[in-house]
Amino acid sequence: MIVDRYLARETTKPFALTALFLVGVFIAYSLTRFLTEANDGLLDGSAILVLTGLKALIALEVLLPIALYIGLIVALGRLHSDREIIGLRASGFSENRILVPVVSMAVAVAILVAAVSLWVRPWAYQSLYALEADAKANAELEDLPPGRFHIHGDAQRMVFIDERDPATDELRGVFVRSGRGDTLEVISSARGQLTAFARDDAHQLALQQALIYKQASGHGGADRDLAGRFDAFEIWTPAVTADPPGYRPKAQPTSALSASTRDEDHAEVQWRWSTPVSTLLLALVAAPLSRTRPRRGRYARVLLAVIIYVLYFNFIGVARSEVEQGDLAHLWWAPGALAMALAIVWPLARRTAP
C-alpha cells in the first residue's frame, strides 16, 4: 500500500547513502594502502584494482549492518521529529504495523549479509591470499623501478638501479651487494642488461665494466679481500615462484569449517552465522533508539547509537577470540545479551513514546 511504499522509500534512502559512503571510504583507504605498495614496486595497477575489489567484498559483512543501523536511526528519527509517526498513529496505524516495512528491509539485508559472510567472503579471501602470494612472487628485479634499493632472497642480496630504459631494458648505474654467511660481495657497474627468465628458474643480469669487491673470512678468522675489474660479468637471480597459501580459516568453505574440530574454525563459522543475526538485532535496536521528541532533530540519537554499536562489536570480538583460544564453546552470549537488553528496553520505550 501507499504507506508501506513511503516508509520503505524513506528508510531505504538513508541506508543506501550510508552504505555508499562507508564503502567509498573503505575503498579509498584500501587504495591508499595498495598504492603505497605499488609505489614500492610490489604491486602493479591491475592487481591494485582486483585487491581493492576483493577487500570491499569482504568488508560488506560489516559495512552493510552498520549502514542499515545508522540509516534506520536517521530515517525513523526524522519521522519522529517531523511528527509523521504521530500522524500515522492518529490515522489508525499501530506501531507494529508501521515497523513492518522496516523489518522487511532488515530481513532482506540480513539475507544479503548472510550470503556475503557464508559464501562470498570465503571466496574473496581465497582469491585475495592467492593474488597476494603471486604479487610477492612477481615483486622481483624485472618488475622493480629504478632509483630504489630492492632486497631479494631474505635480505641476502640488495640491488640498486640508477636508470632503466623501458624500451631496451638497458640498465645504468647498477649496484649489487650480496652477503651469505661471512662472505660479502659488492659489485658496481656502469651499464647492464636484464634478461628476465633467461632460464626457467632464473633471471640474468649481464653487467659491463663491473668493479667487484669481495670480502671473506679465511682460516683462523682472518679476512681475505679480493678486488677485480671485469669487462663483462653475469649475475643469475633465482626466479621466485608463488608458494601456495597455507591453511587459513577465513578462506575455507563454511561446510568444511562446520565439520572441523579446530577451535579457530569453530570461531570462524560462528562469526559467519552471527553477522546476519547481528544485522537483524541492530535493526531492531534502531527502532526504540530512534525515538525523539518533536523538533529535536533526526540526528539526536546518532552518537548514542554509535556507542552502542562499538560496545556490541567489541563484545562479540572478545567472544570470538575466546572461542578461538578454546576458552568458550560459543560466541552467542554477545548477541544473546543484546537481544535480552532489547527485550527489556522495547516495552519501556513503547510506554514512554511521545
Image: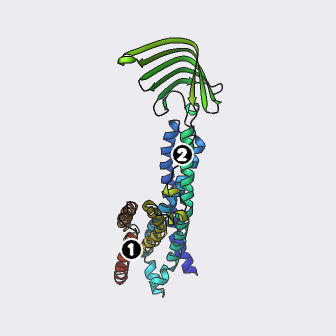
- Placement of the C terminus among the 4 image quadrants: bottom left
Residue 286: image location, x then y, percent: 42, 72
Residue type marked 2: Glu
Q: For residue 206, what is the image quadrant? A: top right
Q: Residues within 10 Å of mark 2 (few under 14, many from 20)?
A: some
Residue 105 rendering spot, x and y as whole percentages: 53, 73
Mark 1: secondary structure = helix
- Tell me the number on the disc at residue 132: 2
Quadrant where the image shows the N terminus: bottom right
| Residue 303, position as x, y percentages in the image | 36, 64
Give the residue pinned by disc 1.
336
Indicate whether 59 appears above or below 85.
above
Of the two numbered discs 2 and 1 on the same chain, state the one appearing first in sequence: 2
Which residue lies most toward the front here? 219
Q: Is residue 354 visible?
A: no
Image location (x, y in percent) of residue 315: 36, 65
